[in-house]
Amino acid sequence: MGFALVMLIATLFFGMLASFSYLNPEFYNQYIPFYQLRPMHVSAALFWIIGGATSCLLFFKKEVSEEGAKRTIAERLFINLWMITVVVIFLFYSFKKFGGREYWEFPPFLCLPLLISWLALMVAWFKAWLKAKDYPLYVWMWTAGICFFLFTFLEQNLYQIPWFRQSFLKEVIVQWKSNGSMVGSWNQIIYGCSLFLMVTLTGEDSIARTKTAYYFFFLSITNMMFNWGHHIYNVPSASWLRDVAYGISMTEWLFFIKMLQSFKEKMDERRKFKHLITYKFLIAAEVWVFFNLTLALLMSIPAINRYTHGTHVTVAHAMGTTIGINTMILMAAMSYILRVDELEIRDKRWVHWGYYISQASLVVFWVSLIIAGFLKGTRQFNFPHITYQELMVPVNYWLRVLSFSGAFLLLGFLLMLKTYFKALRKA
Amino acid sequence: MGIKPLVFILLFTAYSGYSIFTYTFGTKAPSHAPHADALATKGKLLFQQKNCIACHQIYGLGGYLGPDLTYEMSQPTKGRTYAIAILTAGLNKMPNYHLKQDETDALIAYLTYIDNTARFFNNN
């Protein structure tokens, strides 16, 4: 868990540096260029989310299966191999050795230890799964997340087989497919943690057993499997790939309506638990789900997607999801595991301050990305013959706002993590 | 077996089938579609090693510091000469990678291949 939290700091730190190097590349190119900072930022974010999610999963697994606190060999293999590989990946980045694939920018042979590590996690999980007394929805979500991560991780590496890279179009489509679905796979693990926390906090076991909850679970994995095609609207692929994606994406309106319906319930619940740090983060995640779902629904409409695809609107969606939703849920889960709520008031005060600074700066961060993206998208169509530098002139103003809000985001998280690390030392 | 495992298995089977369908019919290229020659393949490898994707996009996949390169070679105001100039000397935002002549040629061949592929599929 400590390693995952270090990755979170690395994500924000490299992200802030990358945003400044984006604005002043001439200066940064002499020392640490953008093409080196971006993989450091992106990989740190991936390893924070996956590492954070799996560390929470390993903790909650003990409660579900009533296993002892001692780590199994498979768990130790997973944790140690994962951490060593991540360190080696960053060493490769520091020597400017890249694999050059989007999101997984390290040399591809390093995927092998990550794969072995994940298989060890699967062994640990399924051993506990067999011992579980019953299978509430969060167990299903964790199982789905673990299995689909393996599927998409292997798919992401299919380009190593010559048949998959003989056609450039095939390679691009498979890459979008695997990356699009992979996000859904770790979302299942993280949302499973969120559901587990809600059950534990409210004491209402029925939340994870209703027919409606299972219906939305199956709908969400259907989306994870088939809606990746909205990433390839501008790729000249078979049209049915886009039609299926559009049809499936539109079922997300059902999540949207469900969220609005449960809003009142949430408000009543909030009055009861608002003093809890864990609950605060869960509510923040809920608000960010609402914002991002609205954005995702709009982006799935082809007429809008034409302007937003390949712009900072896509980044806004990615950042809103990874920071606003995934990170908030992980912060909630970790505060529960580390018993942050039981610390002294002065320690918790740091978390409260950090929480409000990070939420406020994230709103500015997110909105500036959307404005920057729309400006870029519309200017691309309105002024097709101007140079890229000219195109970006008004966009860069909003990217400055983004950089400064990013610095405040880092500050907010540092304040919170100060207390988390203290709790970690005590645990 | 309960209904939940059945739905899960059904969805997973559908996903696997859909994936195979995507790899084959969904991404099938006609035999007369552009193919990457040895030089373009070398350029592709170089594109990955230099991590060009961190700043440039292809079909919207990649970073945002520089322009999308999918149709760069056929742009009326840009094209081959413009690309060679930038690859050789760099720009204020793009570092000079001090590429050798054969490396520049390989990258140009790769970008030309992407452009040809994109236009071929759009026109068919």
Image (tube, coloured by chain):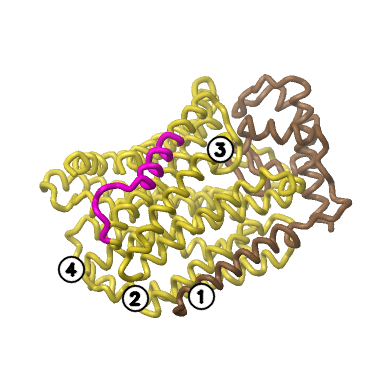
Q: Colour of chain A?
A: yellow
Mark positioned earlier in the residue sequence (2 or 3) = 3
Question: How many numbered badges does the structure rendering display?
Answer: 4
Disc 4 designates what residue? A272
A372 magenta-colored: no
Return the chain for callout 2: A
The percent coordinates of residue A265 (x first, y second) are 28, 75
Chain letter of the brown region: B
Three-letter residue code for mark 3: Glu
Residue under the image location 53 percent in, 63 percent down: A224
Q: Are marks 4 and 2 in contact (CB under 8 Å)?
A: no
Please tell me which residue lies in front, B97 or A394: B97
Residue at disc 4, secondary structure: helix
| Range of residues picked out in magenta | A66-85
Element under disc 1: helix
The amino acid type, in three-letter code, at marker 1 is: Val
Q: Which residue is mark 3?
A: A105
- What residue did someone put label 2 on? A209
Q: Is residue A111 left or right of residue A379?
A: left
